[in-house]
Image (cartoon, rainbow, N blue to C red):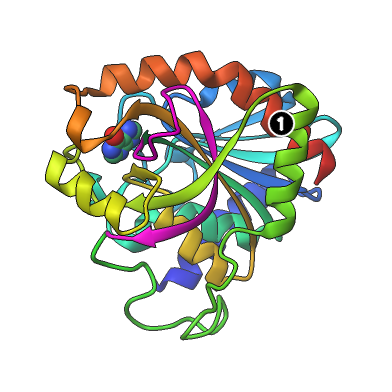
Amino acid sequence: MDILQEINKAKEYILNLYNKKIDAAIILGTGLGSIVDEVENKLVIAYKDIPEFPVSTVAGHAGELIIGKINKKSVIIMNGRFHYYEGYSMDTVTFGVRVINALGIKDIIITNAAGGMNPHFKAGDLMIIEDHINFMGTNPLIGKNYEELGPRFPDMSEAYNSELIVLTEKSAKELGYEIKKGVYAAVTGPNYETPAELRMLRTLGGDAVGMSTVPEVIAANHMSMRVLGISCITDMAIADNLEPLDHRKVLETAAKAQNKFVSIVKSVIEKM
Ligand code: HPA
C-alpha cells in the first residue's frame, strides 16, 4: 500500500464516524492537552482504532483524535504527536497532518514545548512561530513526490501564515497577554542541547529550540495548508546560563502556561 492509500484508509474511517465540515485542526504539543476539556460535543477516536494511524510513545502525549466544537467552530485535535526521535519515519511523523488535509481542512495550529534561546524570553512565555530553521538533517519530503499532495519543490516563503500571526497577536492583546514572536530551530533530540549547540543555534538565528513541528509544517506547506505555529517556552536554553533539564520540568512549565495557551487558541479559532 502506498502512502496515498494509507492516508485514504484513515480518512475513510474518520469520515464514517464524522462527516460534517471541520473548520480547523490543532496538533497539541507536550503538556498542552487541556484545551481538549474546552471541546463541546466531543467525539474521541483512539489512534489505535484508526487504520494505518501510528501510536505515540512519549509521556505527556495521549493518542487520540478529538472532534467537536470550540466557540461554534468545529475542530479536530491531534492529542499526541509522532516524533522523529521515537524512531518513526518522516512519513509516520507527518501522517496525521496529511490525514487532516485529506479531510479537507486547510487551517492548522501546530503547537509545541520549546527551549527559549532568546534572552528576552522567560519560561512560561508563548511564542508565535514566525519562521523556522530545519536542523533535523532530514526532510519529510525526501523520496518520491506525490503530486496529489503537492509539488516536488514546495514554496516556503511564508511557511507560517501571516494573517494567522496577526490574528493571534490580536487575540493575545485583547486578552491582556504578552506574546512573543520568533524563529523555531528544530533538532532531532532526544537529548537536550549542549551549551555549544545552543550557542550555535542562537548564532544561526533561532529564538527557540525543539524536537518537533518542522516536519509537520513542511508537509502542511507542501499541501498548501495555512499554518499557525505556537511554542510554549518551557525552559531557558541559554548556553552561558544553562541549568540541568528533564522532561518533568518541561511538563510542569507547560502545565502552568496552559490557561494562557487555551485562552489564546480559543480566541484565534473564533476569529479564523
Ligand atoms: N530543547 C529542546 N527541546 C525542548 C526544550 C529544549 O530546551 N524544551 C522543551 N523542548
Q: Looking at the picture, does residue 40 appear above or below residue 145?
A: above
Does 30 sit above or below residue 89?
above
Give residue 229's position: percent from left, percent from top: 56, 47
At a point 76% along the width and 23% down the height, the residue shown is: 175
Instruction: Specify whether residue 94 is in view.
Output: no
- Would you call the spot at circle 1 few (<14 residues within 10 Å), some (14-19), or many (20 or more)? many
Residue 19 vs residue 247, the one in the foreground: 247
Q: Residue 167: where, in percent of width, then height?
A: 76, 45
Helix or strand or loop: what does disc 1 sit on? helix
- Toward the viewer: 120 or 108? 120
Ligand 1: give its quadrant: top left
* 132 drawn magenta: yes
Ligand 1 lies under 8 Å from the Cβ of mark 1: no
Instruction: Say if the magenta span includes residue 158.
Output: no
Residue depicted at 52% across the width and 19% down the height = 257
- Would residue 33 be found to the left or right of residue 19 on screen? left
Residue at image x 47%, y 65%? 218
- Direction from residue 57 to residue 147 in the image, left or right: right
Q: Which residue is mark 1?
A: 172
Residue 241 located left or right of residue 151: left
Q: Is residue 122 left or right of residue 109?
A: left
- In which quarter of the view is residue 271 placed? top right
| Depth check, front residue: 86 or 191 | 191
Residue ID at (18%, 41%): 193
Q: Position of residue 2 (x, y in %)?
A: 40, 73
Q: Residue furthest right?
A: 72
Picture quarter containing residue 205?
bottom left
Q: Which residues, given as a range, are shown in magenta?
A: 116-135
- Quadrant into which the N terminus falls: bottom left
Whether residue 257 is visible, yes or no, is yes
- Amino acid at pointer 1: Ala
